[in-house]
Amino acid sequence: MDKGALSERDICTKFVLPAVKSSGWDEMLQIREEVYFTKGRIIVRGKLVSRGKAKKADFVLYYKPNIPIAVIEAKDNNHSVGDGMQQALDYATTLEIPFVFSSNGDGFVFHDRTGAGGATETNLSLDAFPSPADLWARYRAWKGLTPEAEQIVLQDYFDDGSGKGPRYYQMNAVNAAIEAIAKGRDRILLVMATGTGKTYTAFQIIWRLWKAGRKKRILFLADRNVLIDQTMVNDFRPFGAAMAKLSASAGTIERSDGTVEELTTAIDRHRRIDTAYEIYLGLYQAITGPEERQKLFREFSPGFFDLIVIDECHRGSAAEDSAWREILKHFSTATQIGLTATPKETAYVSNIDYFGEPLYSYSLKQGIRDGFLAPYKVIKVHIDRDVEGYRPERGQVDREGEEVEDRIYNTRDFDRTLVLDDRTKLVARKVTAFLKQSGDRFQKTIVFCVDQEHAARMRQALINENAALVTENHRYVMRITGADAEGQAQLGNFIDPESKYPVLVTTSRLLSTGVDAQTCRLIVLDREVGSMTEFKQIVGRGTRIHEDTKKFYFTLIDFRGATSHFADPDFDGEPVQIYEPGPDALMTPPDAAPPASDEDSPIPPAPGPDEYIVDGPRDIAIPGFGEGQQKIYVDGVGASIITERIEYLDENGRLITESLRDFTRKALKRHFASLDDFLKRWKSAERKQAIVEELEAEGLPLDRIAEELGKDLDAFDLICHIAFDRKPLTRRERAENVKKRDMFTKYGSQARAVLDALLAKYQDEGVFNLDDPRVLQISTFDRMGTPVQLIKAFGDRTDFERAVHELQSALYQETA
């Protein structure tokens, strides 16, 4: 057999796999081939959305299911035996796998990442591949696992038989937590970006510890009722009858598959706790409070729970004097695991001080690059009153007739202490304009407001802007806040991908964390977000991908400058585009090219062979401000949009600000090397429209540039003028130049009339496909004859097309 003629796959099948199997690895349980462990980054180029190439390991070897310990990268036999090693090491680092192999079918290079002594890299013959027992012994020694700890570490994951398994980063987090707990660590912090499945990860940790008998009574704490309910009927469902909610209120909830389930509760109407369960889920608020009688958690003895998992532990649980912290102190002997997307570090509050350094972290940035989280565009809107402030005129009175205090009011005052109703209406108008211009007015949208009263006014303003749709269904716009029972009752429908209504939701704090709104495509910020922690949580409301509804990215509209957090080094998830519309500009961003990217994650300007297209054109108050104050309502002041600019990320990740014109100029010059290059492309193109469509697919906003210039220019003149500084000719000027040449005299009267009509159509509409006979079917030509008759005036179809090509060449004869 000539190995050099074999493909890489042949080498895997005929040499690598037999060598691994002969050393004792079980093909069904321990060996996986072609393991895709990322999804492929979602790349947004204007309206074109594609997925990049997913990362794939040739072989991953598992000592037990979901406990990977070795990766093998194979190359064909024209490579040396170690040529796959660097690629394999990159995969092993991501997957946190200690043993790495490279092969070309002649043998193996073995790299031991544990640093346990001896040579780091060694050459092995095909028949010397290590057995499972050999590698596990090395692994066990590296991790320092005792026989008791090993028993816990080898406890199986939950498997429902559906084939669903943890993603690689979830597996990393679960295995790291289990190993740490098995070795006696009792405070653990896991940092995982919103939308990456923290609850599922927590479930697998709890399941394995519970089944291993290491943790027999477990408490799962959260601070949103909907989070507890969703968790019980979805991720935690396998616990079945061993699980109950720490609540006296019985209730039902709809599961993700549409069935309705009654929740088991562990507190009776006399507030007595049933201690017969093993898995308890509870709200902080339900088991504690400022008064002693509210501290229900004291009904449990301090040693009752073996394990406590704290969801969203970035909030009050981290504060030393918080009511939540006293729960954790009461059960101080229990192992405690904190889950958060955003570890909180301030002078007063610290997760790390309590839990220790994060045991495992998976960032928003990594989730976007791996393709598990949706990227996003940002629209930054600057309102004159926010930027310039507002000072009342002498004698200005509010709605109550009281004189408004004479001082400068700024963005921190608006909707907190001072209400400018025109500003609220402007925000609602701009949000509605975005929805209309995007072509989809049923995008699930969350509008974050200053407080519940502001959310009520914003709801009213949005209703008035969308009156026709509200008439069709009053739930098109709803307020969902903590004090609004009717709104809260619709929360399940809002997050349900199958439910059309509600569409636009106004809120203050309720939806900022934990709510799994998979189909949310638009997030609007009309309040300041002073906390990086909260900002990341709010961004996380849109990062879930929902492929069934083609939700691959989302848009964030910022009216309050909250996206200044992008400049914070602690922010780790760059947007794909930032757009700032001017006073009369469209709210939808221009179709910009993708952001320039850093060295370790390059993004090409157009989809390459490794990508596939997935979609195409188609409440926290600031301390000291307004606490306990009555709001002042001032009418008739007015508000307007004042700025326009585009910001994008350069190759170093810095935000660069340019005008739309400069932005487009650079993009076009990347596309066409010179004016001659463009002219050759244009003249050789059978369909001029094909060039325009190619530019549109790459996100170049020629139509927006035309609007900015305010002239009737077609794509040819726009490109020549913007990219190469040529004086543009309007469509009328080009049409007049053709008429002056009197080039139609060689045709009969009917053919000349057709060409004159086509020229007029170009002048009015800039149509490129004039040689398509279907253009003769429009009403302009009805009185001149049928399309067949008109084509016969030239001879035949070929003669018609030749005449129109001459017309088009004449149109573009002058390049000013």
Image (cartoon, rainbow, N blue to C red):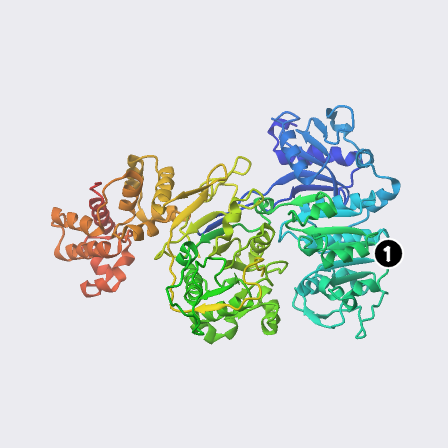
- For the point 62% across and 60% down, the residue is 515
Please state which of residues 365 and 412 is positioned toward the viewer in this rendering. Answer: 412
Is residue 449 shown left or right of residue 736?
A: right
Q: Position of residue 733 (x, y in %)?
A: 18, 49
Is residue 585 shown left or right of residue 29?
A: left
Asked if residue 774 can be seen in this view, the reply is: yes
**Three-letter code, disc 1:** Gly
- Helix, strand or loop status at disc 1: loop
Please state which of residues 99 and 663 is positioned toward the viewer in this rendering. Answer: 663
Please state which of residues 37 and 184 is positioned toward the viewer in this rendering. Answer: 184
Point out the image quarter for the N terminus: top right
Residue 8 sits above or below residue 451 on the image: above
Q: Position of residue 290 (x, y in %)?
A: 73, 64
Residue 4 sits above or below residue 503 on the image: above
Is residue 137 shown left or right of residue 165?
A: right
Please state which of residues 605 and 114 is positioned toward the viewer in this rendering. Answer: 114
Question: Where on the picture, by quarter, is residue 273?
Answer: bottom right
Q: Position of residue 243 (x, y in %)?
A: 79, 63
Q: Position of residue 452 (x, y in %)?
A: 56, 67
Question: Where on the picture, by quarter, is residue 360?
Answer: top right
Residue topped by disc 1: 303
Point out the image quarter for the C terminus: top left
Residue 235 sits above or below residue 718 on the image: below
Label 1 environment density (alpha carbons within 10 Å; few <14, some 14–19, many ≥20): few
Asked if residue 245 can be seen in this view, the reply is: no
Is residue 41 shown left or right of residue 257?
A: left
